[in-house]
Image (cartoon, helix red, strand yellow):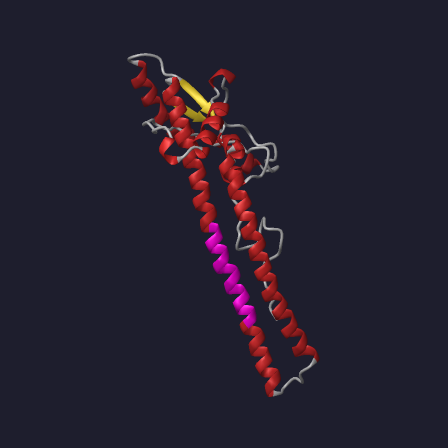
Amino acid sequence: MAVVSFWLAAVLPLVGQQAVSGSVRVAVVNVPAVSEKYLKTTDLETEFEKLRQTFNQQREALQSRIDRTAQSLQEELKPGTEEHWERRKQLALLDAELRVFIESEGQKVESKIASSLRAIFDDILAATRETALERGIDVVLATDQMPKNVPDSSTQVRQQIMLQKVLYWSPRVDLTDDVITRVNANYKAPPSSSPPVGSARPVGGAERPASRNTLGARLFASGMGAPSFASGEGWGTDTACESR
């Protein structure tokens, strides 16, 4: 209840101030749906797919060197000899090199993903402001809906319930399609021709997951986070090194 109370404390004073001079016009936007249909999201996913392929090729090349070195150590060299000892050190260095590569490259890509997700949200926020100002909207809320795949846990279900801020909205106040059209028009237009962004007070709630697991929707879905690149999650291969 603390989360709901905090949200009400932030929104109600705004509504009360506006009500003195007239009614407050409120609209909603489905942020994950906008992200999923944003052309920039598709372009970024293509870019990160290329990075994934390059990463896997380099990782596999290092792993192949490790496998060949380990095989020669077992089949060609006699244990206890100086050459055997030198090959073991070489194998350890290669294994360390692979681990450092996975960690360092993973951190670089995750940083790029974080920047891209923020850029997507900033573009959606700007398009929402423009649309709201054009329509005379005072407050825009993010729509909420309980995810269908909530685990069968009372604690997690309770957390999802606490995230719900907008329980009902009429389709006539849904600006999602308009924001999708505007954010894509802004993305395709030259920077100089983009309309100015006016000031508006963004008030957001938790967002529901989009239908597909896109780059933007992963972050903007309620209670979800982007997969870890360094761990190999979501990249189609196991990037863990085997100790030898």
Which residue occupies 32% across, 14% down? 19
Q: Main secondary structure of the magenta part?
A: helix
Relative placement, left or right, of 137 versus 29 is left
Residue 239 screen position, x and y as percent: 59, 58
Which quadrant is the C terminus positioned in? bottom right
Q: Is residue 74 visible?
A: yes
Extreme residue toward the right, this view: 75
In which quadrant of the rendered view does residue 25 lie?
A: top left
- Magenta segment: does it hold 83? no
Residue 225 showing in the rendered view: no
Q: Foreground residue, 143 or 164?
A: 143
Q: What span is colored magenta in the figure?
A: 94-110
What residue occupies the far bottom of the structure in this picture? Answer: 81
Q: Position of residue 69 (x, y in %)?
A: 63, 74
- The verdict on residue 105 being magenta is yes
Q: Residue at the location (59% across, 79% down)? A: 87
- Number of marks: 0
- Which residue is located at x 56 percent, y 76 percent? 90
Q: Quadrant of the N terminus?
A: top left
Looking at the image, residue 179 lies above or below residue 156: above
- Residue 20: percent from the left, percent from the top? 29, 13
Q: Position of residue 190 (x, y in %)?
A: 40, 34
**Residue 228, relative to residue 65: is it above or below?**
above
Q: Residue furthest top?
A: 22
